[in-house]
Amino acid sequence: MSAVPPLEVRGLTVRFAGLTALDAVDFTVRPGTVHAVIGPNGAGKSTCFNVLSGVYRATAGSVRFGDQELTGMRPHRIAELGVARIFQNLALPPRATVADSLLLGRHRLTRAGFMAAGLRLPSAAREERRHRERVREIAAFVGLERQLDQPAGTLAYGQQKLAELARALCMEPRLLLLDEPVAGMTADERRSTAAVIAGVRDSLGISIVLVEHDMGVVMRLADAVTVLDFGRRIADGAPGDVQNDPAVVRAYLGEDDRTGDGEGRP
Ligand SMILES: Nc1ncnc2c1ncn2[C@@H]1O[C@H](COP(=O)(O)OP(=O)(O)OP(=O)(O)O)[C@@H](O)[C@H]1O
């Protein structure tokens, strides 16, 4: 697939029955960078994520990936353009082996298709071998080569999340959408997952949109950060600048009143 184009979000607005979840939001994800979208609870992060992957319709505005307009496209069309998404909750079939789940991730790229494979045509066998090799490479890249033959459900939580990342990489995406990839992980798992995500950017050149509450991970990993609050963009820039922006500090301090736990404070 062709080079990674920028993702350009312009004037993105989403309204739900009187509530404006996103209000004319702009940002650009530069090719091969990690772009974090952060903000206090209810800021509109998940809504933004769901529009980018085609789950929600935008009320107004545009999302362009190169020369393609994504708003209005169905999720599978967006996936076909090389936009892979990882869900917040575990989504791998627990009884299938990691290898089989990753192979399914390559379905979009399979020419022979399952019919030819079912008929045991030699071309299909060759193609399957090629895909299995690539699956092994990707598993090694995320550090799961030794777990390939295990049922996904038997892996530790952090490894299951890595297997999902690997499955998304099996689509050979150009843009990866990660929804809270380190939520629920131990400190060790967070560190190693962040390292794998950095590796995806650095070695594969894939652009990454990261919605994440863990500010340590955001600050270490992101090349650029867009901060939302009540659906509006209140800051956008390099992590260090955004962290010290008075509007951002105010928004996160206000979160103490909203949730009482101050989760996600930078
Ligand atoms: N499907 C929906 N229908 C109605 N309102 C919604 C829907 N999805 C989100 N909202 C509302 O839109 C606003 C933004 O929510 P969103 O989930 O995008 O925020 P968030 O930043 O992801 O929050 P959190 O960090 O708590 O996950 C909230 O007020 C939420 O209640």
Image (cartoon, rainbow, N blue to C red):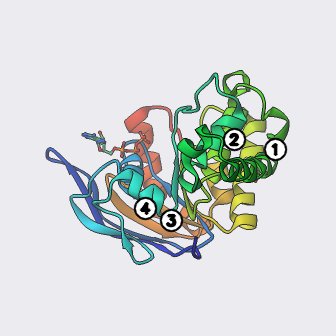
| Label 2–label 1 contact, CB within 8 A | yes
Left or right position of 193 against 146:
left
Looking at the rendering, in which quadrant would you find the N terminus? Answer: bottom right
Mark 3 highlights which residue?
245
Q: CA distance from mark 1 to mark 4?
A: 40 Å
Q: Earlier in the sequence, mark 4 or mark 2?
A: 2
Mark 3, secondary structure of its residue: loop
Mark 2, secondary structure of its residue: helix
Q: Is residue 92 visible?
A: yes
Mark 1 highlights which residue?
143
Q: Is residue 210 above or below residue 205?
A: above
Res. 243 image quadrant? bottom right
Q: Is residue 189 above or below residue 48?
A: above
| Label 4–label 2 contact, CB within 8 A | no
Q: Residues within 10 Å of mark 3 (few under 14, many from 20)?
A: some
Mark 4 highlights which residue?
247
Between 14 and 217, which is closer to the camera in this rendering? Answer: 14
Of all residues shown, which one is farthest toward the right? 146
Percent x, y for residue 14?
25, 55
Q: CA distance from mark 1 to mark 3?
A: 37 Å
